[in-house]
Image (spheres, grey):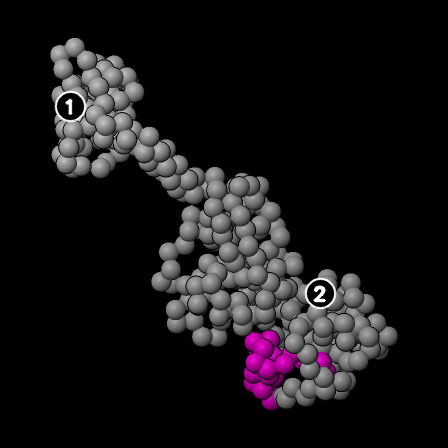
Amino acid sequence: MTPRQLHAFVAVAQTLSFARACERLHMSQPALSLAIRSLEDSLGGRLLSRTTRQVKLTPEGAALLPQAIQLLADWDNVRERSRQHFTLQRGHVTMAAMPSFASNVLPKIVHDFRASFPNVEVTVHDVIQEDVVSMVAAGRVELGFGFEPESAEKLRFQPMFVDRFVAIVPAGSPLAQLRSVTWAQLLSDNFIALQRPSAVRRLLEVSLAASGMELRVGLECHQLVTAGQFVASGLGVSVVPHLCEQQMTAMGARSVRLTRPIIRKPVGLITRMDQQLSTAAEAIYRAVDSNALGRS
C-alpha cells in the first residue's frame, strides 16, 4: 500500500462518490480509479462495490477504512516530525565539555543556540578532558569541547582559541603580590597537581621537561575545582587554564601570570570524522566555526 492509494480509497469511502473524491484530491477520475484498483490488487480483493448509480463499501472495505485513516494520520505525523527535526523546530543534541569550558564559554553558545531554536533539547556532560575525547570517539555524544586531543586519528578538531595556563596561589602567599611568577618560583612551594592520566598533568610535565625542568608534586587530586579549593585553603600552589581563573579567584585563591616557560594549549570543538552530525549538532558546529574567537 502507498499513501497515495490510501488517500484515494479514504476519499471515495467517505464521500461514496468518485466525482467528489476527485475534487477533494485534485485528481482525474482515471488516476483515482487506477489508485483504487492498484490498492485492491495489492490486497487481493474488492474494497468498493460500484454501479452506475452508487458506490458502496464492501465488508472488507468497511473494515479497512478506520485503519486506513489511522495509517494516514501516523504517516503525516512521522513526516511532520521529521520535517521539524530538519528545520530545527524540534530535536535533541548531546555534547560533552571539560568543566572549565562548560562553566565559562559554553553557556553563551547554548544560550545563542536556544534563542534561535528553543524547541531543540540540549544535553551537556561536563566531564574531564579525557572523558570528553572518549565520549566523542565512542559516539556517545555528537560534539565535544576541550583541549586539542593528543591522538586524533578518527577525530576532527576545530580550534576556537588558545588558552594560556596561569598560576594560582593562596591569598596570603608572597607570590600573590607579584605581577608574574616563574615556574622555578612556583615549584619552590608545595605543588598541587591533577592525578595521572590527566591531560593537563601530562601537558605540564611534557612542557617543563622540554625546558629542562621537573614537575615536583606534593599533593594530587582529580578535579581542577578541588585543586583550587586546596590552594585557597593554603595547602600549596597550582597551575590551571586561564578559563578557570574566575572560578579560582571566587574560591579565594589568587591568579598570577606564569612565565618561563609559558604554556599554551588550543581549545576547540571535537567531532568524529566518520559520523554524520544531526541537523541540530551541525547548526552548533557552524556557529562555533563562524565565531571562532582566535584569542590567546
Residue drawn at x 77%, y 85% is 189
Q: Which residue is mark 2?
A: 245
- Tell me if I can see residue 258 in this picture: no
Labels 1 & 2 near each other (Cβ < 8 A): no
Highlighted magenta segment, given as a residue range: 191-212
Residue drawn at x 23%, y 30% is 60
Is residue 54 left or right of 137 when viewed as pictured?
left
In the picture, the quarter occupied by the N terminus is top left
Residue 200 colored magenta?
A: yes
Tell me the crowding category of disc 1: few under 14, some 14 to 19, or many 20 or more residues within 10 angstroms, Cα based. Answer: some
The picture places residue 84, in percent across and down from the top left corner, at: 43, 39
* Vertical comparison of 222 with 190: above or below: above
The picture places residue 211, in percent across and down from the top left corner, at: 59, 85
Is residue 75 left or right of 119 when viewed as pictured?
left
Residue 232 colored magenta?
A: no
The residue nearer to you, when weighing 215 against 64, is 64
* Vertical comparison of 268 with 204: above or below: above
The residue nearer to you, when weighing 138 against 152, is 138
Residue drawn at x 64%, y 64% is 100
Disc 2 residue type (three-letter):
Glu
Secondary structure at badge 2 equals: helix
Disc 1 residue type (three-letter):
Ser
Q: Which residue is mark 1?
A: 33
Residue drawn at x 19%, y 24% is 48
Q: CA distance from mark 1 to mark 2?
A: 74 Å
Is residue 77 left or right of 266 when viewed as pictured?
left
